[in-house]
Image: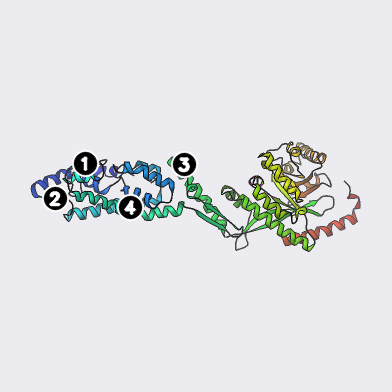
Amino acid sequence: MYGYYALLPMVEVLYQAVDFAQQDWISYGTTEHIVNHSFMAVFTFVGGAGATLGLVFALLIFSNNRAYRLIALASLPLGMLNINEVLLFGLPIIFNPRLILPFILAPVVNTIVSYFFVSAGWVSPPLTGMSFSSPVFINAWIVTQGDFNASLLQLFNIMLSCLVYTPFVLLLNRNTSAKTIMFSSLDTTYSRRAEEAYTLSDDRVGQLVNAQKQQQELETQLNAFSDKEFCLEYQPQICRITGQVVGCEALIRAMDKYGNLYYPAAFLPAFDQAGLMKDIDRWAVIQVVHDLKVAIAEGWAVPTSVNLTPATILDQELMKQLTSYISRVGEYVHVEITEESLLKSSEQVAASLNELHKVGAKIYIDDFGAGFSSLSYLTLFDIDAIKIDRSFVQTIEHIKGQKVFNGLISVAQDLNLAVVVEGVETESQLERIPLRNHLSIQGWYYSKSIPLKALREYVAQRRVVAAEEELEQPELRFT
């Protein structure tokens, strides 16, 4: 990365060339030893390795990144002494592939142009030894025995290197300026501000490179889903006693142009990292309300659960919008929140839950028992139901697992809470779940998530099956 050290194998030759040039000039009034150590110091590496004084001015003039401009400003005094470590490690230039080409090209251009001017006799050749870290403009005047044109040549070289670096600074602008990714299906966008693009300028190089990599990976993941169509599928919830569909859960999916479905695990982590979960929640609520209005008009609607994240629950303005939507079909909406939401500001959470209750929605705690479980939540907040996490169902065939599961059912029954058991996949698991009017089953044993049209057919089918079973075994109807 250091031009001086790259030239170490030739330093002795370059130093000797200064002496030869001086001797030639005294003896003949001319010299062929133009490219010597002083030539490289004052004309090639203006600002340090890579002729980075030009980069400093390019950043100050053209960069729209405040952090970059501050680094350039801090680099300017040192750059006038051909010291550029601030740029090398602060910008950084090291490990920055976008700046490799101009970093090499700028000193090459400076060398060619300077050789042309000196060999043409327009600028005197460097005849005096001079350190690489000598002041710009003054050093050129000294090594050329007081030729003012040498200082002008330095200024010209700075302008040339600035021109070399400018397209790459503009490229940095495009990579670090406000970047927008459009999700037309969700009617939302992701925008990354320039100051948010990478970590602050005082980060270490490794941390900065890692942050840039993470940001690029995030944007790659988001771009991969920007052209996909988002939709909802619904997983039915079945009453053990009647066998009918008593509810369903709305689950988001992404579909590509070939009809392939992508499940939440493939895209929600990236959306969460990008701060887009509130947009997802808003879209889901609007879609659920729309689908419920269709189902109500067709006469087969069932209560539908929609998930809201903690960020949404705590956003009072957004909650006002959502409750306004939900109010149109409030009695059919069940809002699922995680136990994590209840760990937030209790006053804000309680206010949001109260607003939802006002429009007729019911509140479910999703994945109950799997996260930050506390029975105190069931008394502190106005909760209507719990959804028992699938992890309890997976251990229900063991004695201890059965006891824990039955304990949760008993607590819910004592508190007059409805229960949805998630993740039921086998008949053996189903048989170990007690028959209760307030309990319903959601899992692959009955059905995977299905589109709205298929849900309508499934609801009708379950009604027929339930009617047949009631005729055959009426004694099963008990509490």
Q: Nearer the viewer, residue 114 or 100?
A: 114
**Residue kind at label 4, given as amino acid type:** Cys
For numbered disc 2, what is the local secondary structure? Answer: loop
**For residue 309: magenta?**
yes
Earlier along the polypeptide chain: callout 1 or callout 2? 2
Q: First in sequence, mark 2 or 4: give its number.
A: 2
Q: Which mark is residue 296?
A: none
The vertical placement of 325 against 375, above or below, is below
Q: Is residue 95 in sight in this rendering?
A: no
CB within 8 Å, label 3 to label 1: no
Q: Amino acid at mark 3?
A: Gln
| Amino acid under disc 1 | Met
Circle 3 — which element? Answer: helix
Q: Residues within 10 Å of mark 2 (few under 14, many from 20)?
A: some
Left or right side of 442 for 35: left
Q: Are marks 2 and 3 in contact (CB under 8 Å)?
A: no
Q: Residue at x 68, y 58 (%)?
A: 287
Q: Which residues are magenta?
A: 307-312
- N-terminal of the pair, mark 3 or mark 4, is 4
Query: How far apart are labels 1 and 4 at the CA level?
Result: 24 Å
For disc 4, the neighbor class at 10 Å (few under 14, some 14 to 19, many from 20) is: many
The location of residue 311, given as percent across then percent down, is 63, 46
Is 283 left, or right, of 244 in this rendering? left
Q: Mark 1 or mark 4, which is nearer to you?
A: 4
Evaluate whether residue 100 shows in this view. yes
Residue bearing the label numbered 3: 207
Q: Which residue is mark 4?
A: 162
